[in-house]
Image: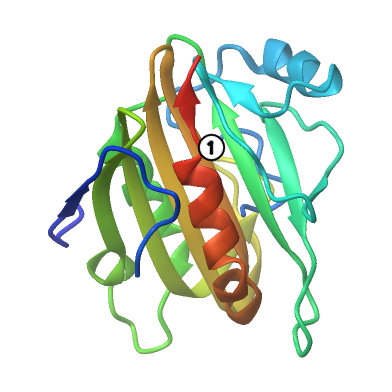
């Protein structure tokens, strides 16, 4: 179980939050095998900005990556100066499934390890909030990213100095998962854009 306590932030409309997922991942929510084919078709038809009964607005300078199985859409985020790798933000929605929210947060944290051996789940920064009537849970974490070829598969490489910025939005038709991973500096530099996108989510 995640040991960190939740911080609750409630607003009617948030314009911005105050303050990746590897390309091989095939399924980003426990038990979310259903709906993959329809989500691929949805992305191919250009409806990347809606899923689970919600819509959102992505930053104009983020590029849309090629369709991938089990993903609604993948956004590609250019690396900032000094970083070699770019970042990516993968969006997932599994109609009728997707696993419990805490189980997904636990798994995301488990994809990172710490150089000093500490438990990543204990270091994850998790907040709960509301925007436009939608319940949102966010997570932030940095460390060594364990890149795998897919769920239940061995780690193929480890990326030091990586970070996670994620959100789970509870839409009318189920949870929608937003997971950004990449070099820590690039992810941090994309923080405002990420927050604006998450807070732009609306039902309908």
| Crowdedness near tag 1: few (<14), some (14–19) or many (≥20) residues, C-alpha within 10 Å | many
**Looking at the image, residue 115 lies above or below residue 172:** below
Q: Position of residue 135 (x, y in %)?
A: 29, 33
- Give the colour scheme of this rendering: rainbow
**Looking at the image, residue 146 lies above or below residue 50:** below
Determine the secondary structure under disc 1.
loop
Which residue corresponds to the image point at 35% horizontal and 89% vertical from the top-left?
116
Front position in the image: 155 or 55: 55
**Looking at the image, residue 30 lies above or below residue 111:** above
**Looking at the image, residue 120 lies above or below residue 63:** below
Q: Is residue 141 left or right of residue 51?
A: left
Which residue corresponds to the image point at 66% horizontal and 75% vertical from the top-left?
186
Q: Position of residue 195 (x, y in %)?
A: 48, 55
Which residue corresponds to the image point at 45% horizontal and 74% vertical from the top-left?
142
**Is residue 119 visible in the rendered structure shown here?**
yes
Which residue corresponds to the image point at 53% horizontal and 37% vertical from the top-left?
28
Q: Position of residue 80 (x, y in %)?
A: 75, 79
From the image, tell me which residue sits under label 1.
28
């Amino acid at each position: 179980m995640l040991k960190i306590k939740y911080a609750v932030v409630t607003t009617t409309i948030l314009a911005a939050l105050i303050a990746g997922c590897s390309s091989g991942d095939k399924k980003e929510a426990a038990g979310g095998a259903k709906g993959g084919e329809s989500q691929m078709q949805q992305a191919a038809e250009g409806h990347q900005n809606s899923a689970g009964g919600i819509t959102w607005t992505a930053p104009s300078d983020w590029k849309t990556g090629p369709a991938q199985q089990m993903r609604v859409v993948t956004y590609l985020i250019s690396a900032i100066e000094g970083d070699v790798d770019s970042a990516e933000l993968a969006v997932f929605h599994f109609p009728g499934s997707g696993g419990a929210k805490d189980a997904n947060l636990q798994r995301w944290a488990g994809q990172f390890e710490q150089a000093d051996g500490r438990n990543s789940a204990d270091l994850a920064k998790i907040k709960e909030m509301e925007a436009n009537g939608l319940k949102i849970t966010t997570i932030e974490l940095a460390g060594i990213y364990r890149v795998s070829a897919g769920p239940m598969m061995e780690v193929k490489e480890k990326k030091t100095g990586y970070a996670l910025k994620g959100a789970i939005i509870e839409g009318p038709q189920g949870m929608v998962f937003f997971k950004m991973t990449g070099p820590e500096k690039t992810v941090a530099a994309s923080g405002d854009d990420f927050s604006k996108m998450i807070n732009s989510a609306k039902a309908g």
